[in-house]
Image (tube, rainbow, N blue to C red):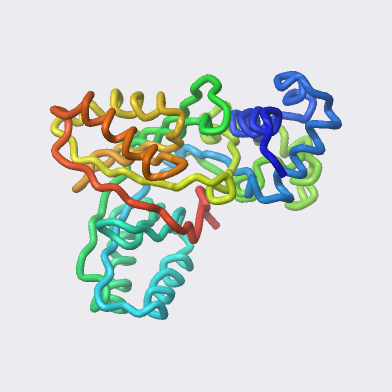
Amino acid sequence: MDLDLLNKKIMYELDLNARASVTEIAKKVRASKETVNFRIKRLLKEGYIKGFYTVFNIAKLGYFYYKTFLKFHRTTPEIEKEIVEYIKNQKNCAYLGSCEGPYDLTFLLMVKNARQFKEFLIKFKEKFGDYVPEKEVHTVLTTHRLNEKFLFAGKTSKHSFYQDEISHYPIDDIDAKIMQTLSTEARISLIDLGNKINIDSKVVKYRIKKLEKEGIIIAYVSAPNFYKLGLQFIQINFNLKNIKTASSIIEFFDKTNKCLYALELLGKYDLTIEIHVENDKVLREIMENFKQQFVEQYNDYDVFNMYKEHLVVWLPIE
């Protein structure tokens, strides 16, 4: 299957709003509903799109993320697998990925307070301390989710939430079930969602609208298969001279049409940029342009090749 211009436009629109109807997408890409419906199903079947997920403002639910980097020491493949499985099985793990670079593993844990994270670290060190002599822990301050433009260079759409603005929006069991389902099935129909959680679809529709209005649900996006698309997943972590320059650096990478996520951090690194490039040559060109423009704005940066994602669950709540 070749990714022609129509397929690329459809993928672009699905990432702008994964819950958009086939009719809405068909109008924007100027194709028939039948064609768009067929193309979406085929993109999923062929593995170009892994699925659709929902971006939540977890700060409004009283949560925030810790982003941690681990460096392995004298590990075997079996021990590394055991470490991955241990972290992956943490109920509050939102992301887990293996990388090549200064560190070997990075993950996000969603917690309500520092004590929760400390309890995890104590148990983790007791079990794997001999194999992980080095770690870096960061508090995620702000998350920026940009939109896919690496296939079709459309307009920029940016969704941000600030995790230093913690609040406690009350959710009940119905809200929790809806959010859990939407977190990994953003494109599910109201009827199917209602049937899955045994709630009337009208109630489901009302609750979703309320969660959107309250700013709990930020966006519905797609999960492209970068490897199928021939793209390398690169994470660049910066130590900045002045953290006020983060916004201009994010804007720079957004204009490359390669950037999907940016995280502002408190820790060793001040900023994480995630980009998706065709090859090392493209990456070098981007970084050379970056250095020309921002040479006085950063102290250092580390480049990671994120070669495997083990877990992506942006709302790991029960």
Residue found 48% across the figure and 57% down from its top: 309
Q: In which quarter of the image is the C terminus?
A: bottom right
Residue found 52% across the figure and 52% down from its top: 313
The quarter of the displayed image where residue 32 is located: top right
Q: In which quarter of the image is the N terminus?
A: top right
Relative to 238, say whether 74 is above or below: below
Task: Please count the marks in the image.
Answer: 0
Q: Is residue 148 left or right of residue 165?
A: right
The quarter of the displayed image where residue 104 is located: bottom left
Q: Position of residue 152 (x, y in %)?
A: 57, 27
Residue found 65% across the figure and 28% down from its top: 9
Relative to 117, say whether 218 is above or below: above
Front-lying residue, 144 or 45: 45
Q: Is residue 206 visible?
A: no
Q: Position of residue 82 (x, y in %)?
A: 42, 76
Relative to 129, say whether 18 is above or below: above
Q: Can residue 103 be seen in this view?
A: yes
Q: Position of residue 8 (x, y in %)?
A: 64, 32
Pick out the residue farthest to the right: 34
Q: Where is residue 316 in the image (x, y as percent from the top left)?
A: 51, 54
Residue found 22% across the figure and 31% down from its top: 291
Front-lying residue, 266 or 1: 1
Relative to 178, say whether 151 is above or below: above
Q: Is residue 6 left or right of residue 115?
A: right
